[in-house]
């Protein structure tokens, strides 16, 4: 009989843990979708309302040379250009065959900490081509244009950093959108002036 009680206790414990886990997942989803955007501290229990969050495709697309404020940072993408890494091209073409079908794109970016606290991570950049295919900057670490933008640098308040982010895309494609994500928000920058 004590063995059955032990199994029942174990099963009840597992169900409780599962309920806590599911509740946590629901909480994370609700928080991500904006369900908790109301100021619930100033509401009585009878005044709390739940509103639906509707996602639309009306995301603002910024332009080159535009100052963009995002979560205590000021971001400016000045330009993007085709980039030839002359020092490495001949050596790497012999070793790294993928380069033959690709071209390098260098993006000139400046990020400034305009907040009052240090920023430990500057965020992440990707680029989309005219077929909506996304490319990651880590694909070309050996080919990066200097000075390279160090996205892992800590910025103190009012400190800024400027440099290049380099991408490899197929030679027959053109970049049209630069995506920036700082892990809490994301923006898009059009590559045409």
Image (tube, helix red, strand yellow):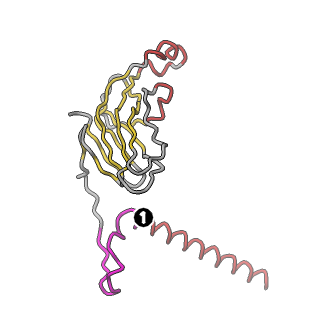
Q: Residue furthest left?
A: 193
Q: Residue 170 location in percent, x, y?
A: 38, 25
Q: Position of residue 104 (x, y in %)?
A: 39, 25
Q: Secondary structure at mark 1?
A: helix
Q: Nearer the viewer, residue 9 or 83?
A: 83
Query: x%, y% of residue 56?
Result: 25, 56
Q: Which residue is mark 1?
A: 29
Residue 2 in the figure: left or right of residue 168: right
Label 1 environment density (alpha carbons within 10 Å; few <14, some 14–19, many ≥20): few
Above or below — where is 58 with respect to 5? above
Foreground residue among 29 and 179: 179
Total number of numbered labels? 1
Seen in the image, is 164 located left or right of residue 51? right
Q: Is 35 situated left or right of 87 in this image?
A: left
The verdict on residue 51 being magenta is yes
- Residue 186 image position (x, y, % from top left): 35, 50
In the image, residue 80 above or below residue 97: below
The residue drawn where x is 23% and y is 33% is 192
Residue 11 in which image quadrant: bottom right
In which quarter of the view is residue 12 placed? Answer: bottom right
Residue that appears at 48% across and 50% down: 120
Q: Inspect the magenta stretch and tell me whether residue 154 lies in it.
A: no
Outermost residue on the right side: it is: 2
- State whether the magenta stretch is mostly helix, strand or loop: loop
Give the image quarter of residue 193: top left
Residue drawn 42% across the image and 46% down it: 123
Q: Quadrant of the N terminus?
A: bottom right
Question: Which residue: 38% across, 23% down?
Answer: 103
Q: Which residues are magenta?
A: 30-52
């Amino acid at each position: 009989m004590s063995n059955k009680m032990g199994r029942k206790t174990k099963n009840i414990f597992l169900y409780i843990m599962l309920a806590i886990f599911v509740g946590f997942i629901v909480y994370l989803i609700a928080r991500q979708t904006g369900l908790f955007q109301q100021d619930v501290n100033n509401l009585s229990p009878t005044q709390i309302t739940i509103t639906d969050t509707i996602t639309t495709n009306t995301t603002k697309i910024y332009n080159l040379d535009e100052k963009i404020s995002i979560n205590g940072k000021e971001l400016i993408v000045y330009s993007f250009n085709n980039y030839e890494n002359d020092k490495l091209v001949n050596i790497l073409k012999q070793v790294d065959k993928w380069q033959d079908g690709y071209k390098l794109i260098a993006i000139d970016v400046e990020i400034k900490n305009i907040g009052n606290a240090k920023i430990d991570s500057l965020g992440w950049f990707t680029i989309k081509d005219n077929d909506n295919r996304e490319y990651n900057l880590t694909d070309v670490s050996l080919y990066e244009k200097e000075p390279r933008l160090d996205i892992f640098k800590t910025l103190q308040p009012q400190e800024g950093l400027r440099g290049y982010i380099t991408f490899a895309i197929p030679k027959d494609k053109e970049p049209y959108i630069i995506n920036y994500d700082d892990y809490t928000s994301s923006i898009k920058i059009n590559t045409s002036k």
